[in-house]
Amino acid sequence: MSERKPFQQTWNSWIDEQVAKAQREGAFDNLPGTGKPLKNLDRPYEEDWWLREFLEREQLSVTPEPIDLRARITQLREEALKVTDEREARRRFVAMNALIARLNGIPQPDAMAPVAPVDVDEEIRAWRRRRGAQRNG
């Protein structure tokens, strides 16, 4: 469809011709979503609907990376405390330290203090104590 519109042809007739040609060639056959209802028709109109859908589809965030990393670090700690396998808990604490190192390597606003890495062995000892208390309690 990179051909140019002929000088003597109107825009509308040229566009109609391009659409008809694409239909004949099957360009509109088997498109994703064919036969499915349109999403979000019940939502009120928002000017940035397309941006919200793009961010959701591409799994992007508008939150600054340092804030995202801090949230992920907190999430990893909570997940590590819930797992029942010590190796998995250790893996999550190590992953937490990797995120902390990444976070501390990013320039941050003055109000955000660096995050100290965790002592993985101390975290595992605390994890064991909590696991023992849960079994006994």
Image (tube, rainbow, N blue to C red):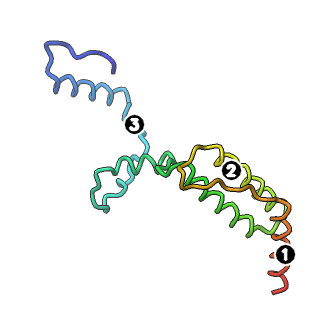
The image quarter in which residue 132 lies: bottom right
How many residues crowd around disc 3 within 10 Å: few (fewer than 14), some, or many (20 or more)?
A: few
Residue 54, horizontal then vertical, whole percent: 42, 46
Viewer-proximal residue among 84 and 41: 84
Query: Mark 3 and 2 residues: CB-CB less than 8 Å, in contact?
Result: no
Amino acid type at image mark 3: Asp
The tag on residue 129 is 1
Amino acid type at image mark 2: Leu
Helix, strand or loop at mark 3: loop
Viewer-proximal residue among 54 and 5: 54
Upstream in sequence: badge 1 or badge 3: 3
Q: CA distance from mark 2 to mark 1?
A: 25 Å
Upstream in sequence: badge 3 or badge 2: 3
Residue 58, horizontal then vertical, whole percent: 49, 45
Helix, strand or loop at mark 1: helix
Q: Give left or right: position of 107 versus 89.
A: left
Vertically, is 79 above or below 95?
below
Numbered disc in front, either 3 or 2:
2
Q: Which residue is rendered at x = 39% and y = 52% of the image? A: 36
Vertically, is 35 above or below 119?
above
Residue 24, horizontal then vertical, whole percent: 33, 27
Upstream in sequence: badge 2 or badge 1: 2
Amino acid type at image mark 1: Arg
Q: Which residue is mark 3?
A: 29
Helix, strand or loop at mark 2: helix
Q: Which residue is mark 2?
A: 99
